[in-house]
Amino acid sequence: MLLQPAIAATNECPDDDLDADVVWVSSGSTILAWSTAYEFEADDAVYTIRASDFNQDLSAALISIEKDGVVREKVLYLDTRPGEDWFNWGADMRVVLTGITTDIHETPSAHLDLYRGENPRLDIEIGATSETHYGINVSSDQYAPGEETTISIEVKNKGGAWIEDVAVWIDLGELKLVDQGFEFHDQMICESLGCMEKGDAGSINFTVAAPAWNGVTSPYRINYTISVSAEGVDIQEKRYCTNKSLTLSCTDPQLLVTQLVCYDEISMSRCNLISSNLSLEEIAISMPEALIYNVSEWSIVEVSIRNIGFYPLYDLNITDPPIPDGFRVAEVHEEGSLTCVSKEHPYRIRYKLVPTKPGKHVVNTTVVRADFYGTKHSWRSDGATITVHGPHIKLTKTITESGNGTHRVALNLQNDGDRAALVDLTDTIPIYARYTEGGMDEGTGIPTGGDFDLRIADDSYLLMANDILLEPEQSIGFSYHVQSDRELNLSRAEAWFIARNDYGGVVFSSILGLPVAVPDYNVTSENLTSEIVTSENVTSGNRSDQSEPPPKVSTPAFENGTGVLPANASGPKDEPEGGNLFDLLIYAAIGIVVLAAAFLLWGRIAREQKGNKEGLDDGLSWAVSSIRKVGSEYEITVTKNSKKRTIKLNEKFYKKLIKDKKLTFGEQTIFIPNNKG
């Protein structure tokens, strides 16, 4: 039921005389000859005005007005007392006699001024203030569930006449009124604005709160409407009414997706890897700290998803992990769940990344998508970059035909990184290929350590160049010629390098040029990764195309006692049965130099091995080097003193190994090396 406000004295306007207080607006004039008519339109009504008759001395005229079949008439006088020269139809229109004239035929005409009465006109403006809740902007046509907003209503008289007894009714619907001091019943506010002169306005301000969300109904189907109506009466007791409404809709869900990078400038360094075929999820759950350990430098990329809106989101979809090319995941730590992200339950995932190659790496933006009651939304984080310093060694082996069965083999070492490296280059040549000549290519940088040496190892020549200092952007080339009467079967060249920060590894060359048979090192696509492999430890790096190096050819006892093969020597079967004393002395001198260099290299390797083995258990302890899941069992590869063994564990023993980091069988113990990163 609408509540009528009590009408007080202030509700009535003081100037309420129809004759004196109506505001008239001139609307033209007309001249009506005797018995002629004129139609006048005012406020959507048509009035027919007629000069019905005139008196004898032409000082008065009988004027009639007809509206909707109703006729009113009045005699209007010239130059008489006030009020006798005009004729009103209520407060809607007025006729004023201003003169009477005749034509040549003595036919009289009335000169009339026409006026339209001004009316009041109520107008309503309604709006809500924009609010900010928890960093979310709620616009003037939106609501926040369970939150307050201020409603402002203005009622204005935009007409040309006053209106009195103005009352305003405000229906709040399902919104809750927070303020006090209003006449309020049945979800309706009733306010009286009384008399409103032309241009007057009245304001009503109050605060409401939206109900809390029920968690079931789609917010897109929940709207709240405030309806306002205002009415009053004019000087003729004619009632005027107007109304307006405001509908508030929900806000969209909001996520804040941030991506932070800790340590965005690092260097390539040594680390230890345990290869595994477990998925990223299995790694995160079972053994995040066991796969990569002894890490010196790393970066951390953290993706955070916070719900800053008013509605929880379920089953979020996140793009692939922002892992740049050139990094490997060492650890994954996850907090929360993408199943449900709310204000109370954010989601965070942190990746510990170990670099596998130097350079400037781009961390892609993270995109999160959600379907909220049939409406798809997405949010995006900023991107980032990580700079990794270190050498980036590339090795190519190119074979070209020189004619007469001779082939030229060119080796090129290049450092594309931004740090220097010390490189040992080794290439293997089958003895049947008959090495003829070789040396450092002209026009290339001069390597520290001089030219390469040539040795015999089993059924091959070993071409070796040690301690080559390769600066950033530097390229060094070697080449040699071989002759063969049959198909060449050449292996890949390899370059072992060390750099600052205890970083090192090995790269293997590609083979370009003539189609030649290349030995298969039993490297399959299943174990191809981007790590560099050293003789004792797997280190982060940039090795191309292989997760494990081919067996490194050890230097055998040389048949001639010197370990050096002359540049023009052929295979063992073609060697002469004897040699002169001068040649033997040369061979002996060269052999002493080579043995000295080998002794120094052996000392360096021994020192590295000693450092790598510090802290490891001795005796009957075996270190885990790889873990593979095979069906329902786990295949564990363990090593000790360069020996490898493979064992299989069921689910129970595997979990015990992961939990305790070791597992004992009688006198034998296997253990996962400690994470010192």
Image: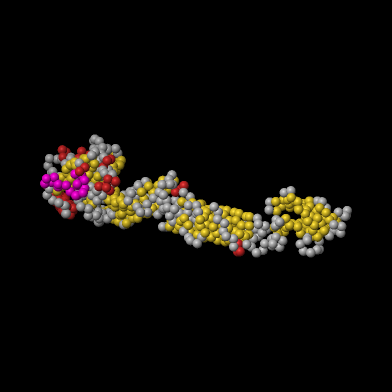
Give the tally of numbered discs. Answer: 0
Residue 431 on image: x %, y %: 20, 40
Q: Position of residue 620 (x, y in %)?
A: 12, 48
Q: Nearer the viewer, residue 334 or 569?
A: 334
The residue shown at (60%, 59%) is 166
Which quadrant, please, contains the C terminus? bottom left
Q: Nearer the viewer, residue 356 or 249?
A: 249
Residue 602 image position (x, y, % from top left): 16, 51
Q: Residue furthest right?
A: 105
- On the image, the x and y values in percent for residue 125 come to 56, 57
**Extent of the magenta region:** 653-669
* Residue found at the far top of this picture: 486
Colour setting: secondary structure
Q: Which residue is drawn at the image coordinates 62% and 55% (left, top)?
A: 240
Residue 361 seen in this snapshot: no
Q: In the image, is residue 329 part of the stretch drawn in magenta?
A: no
Q: Is residue 405 shown left or right of residue 310? A: left
Q: Which residue is located at x 47 percent, y 54 percent?
A: 175
Residue at 23 percent of width and 35 percent of height: 485
Compared across the picture, whether 557 is left or right of 406 comes to left
- Is residue 112 visible in the rendered image? The answer is yes
Q: Look at the picture and state if 488 lies above or below 102.
A: above
